[in-house]
Image (cartoon, rainbow, N blue to C red):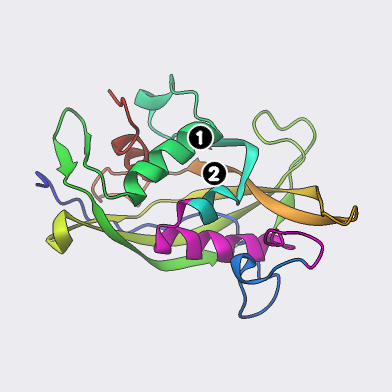
Amino acid sequence: MTRRRPTVSFFVFAATLGLALAGCSSDEITDPGSSGPIPPATPDGLMRDFELAYTRMDLAGYTALLHDGFDFKFLDSRRDAVQWSRDLEISSSGNMFDGNPGELFDGLISCSGVDSISIGELIRVTPWEQTGPDDPDYPGTEQALYQVSIVFHVDGGENIFTIGTGQVFYVKAEQVARHDGASVTGYFLHGQRDMRPAKGIVDLYWGDIKMMFLPGRE
């Protein structure tokens, strides 16, 4: 049972990775030269697929979007020691998508499991921009700021976690080999940077949700 119901309204500074094909997601389009889906061809297309996979709680679809070097940057200094990675992202997300229990801050915030996820807003508010080769965290990527609103329905729909905070998304283009020997350019989510919620709201970050469902969490 949830001991606290944080309600947060947030503006995410993040990146929209636009539509590769209008009205279609990458999990709906199959490359004739490959047995798998075509990777998103644009940043906005990647972010559209990100939204679909997250709201469907589709771990396979979400995993396919993550770059091998994926990293999440926590805002909270309490998490500075956590060396996040693609494997930890998949582990935490899989635990959450499977509806397993989660808790944070020694049980101050807890739930019996996430039943569904609703994204009210995932709006890019800045153009995509290249990061420099000397960027300390995400060199050679593209970044954008997003306005985001996400509701996690928990405890059989009896409670919610509503998160509001800024986010910066980082994407990277890679050449992906097809079975026919040709290659296509696809975009992958390389990183995500947490940001502080609006002043005066409950102090719950997206990073807290990730830690809440990480197996073996503290």
Please state the horizontal and vertical placement of residue 35, each as a whole percent of the image: 71, 59
How packed is label 2: few (under 14 Cα within 10 Å), some, or many (20 or more)? many
Mark nearer the N terminus (1 vs 2): 1
Tell me the CA gap for discs 1 and 2: 6 Å
Which residue is at a point 27% across and 50% down the rendered structure image?
99
Of all residues shown, which one is farthest toward the bottom?
23
- Looking at the image, residue 24 sits to the left or right of residue 183; the answer is left
Q: Nearer the viewer, residue 184 or 129?
A: 184
Q: Is residue 129 visible?
A: yes
* Residue 77 among magenta residues: no
What numbered label is drawn on residue 192? 2
Q: Nearer the viewer, residue 153 or 91?
A: 91
Occupied quadrant, residue 127: bottom right
Query: What amino acid is labelled 1 in the image?
Result: Lys
- Looking at the image, residue 127 sits to the left or right of residue 200; the answer is right
Q: Which residue is mark 1?
A: 73
From this view, report whether residue 57 is shown above or below residue 71.
Answer: below
The boundaries of the magenta stretch are 32-59
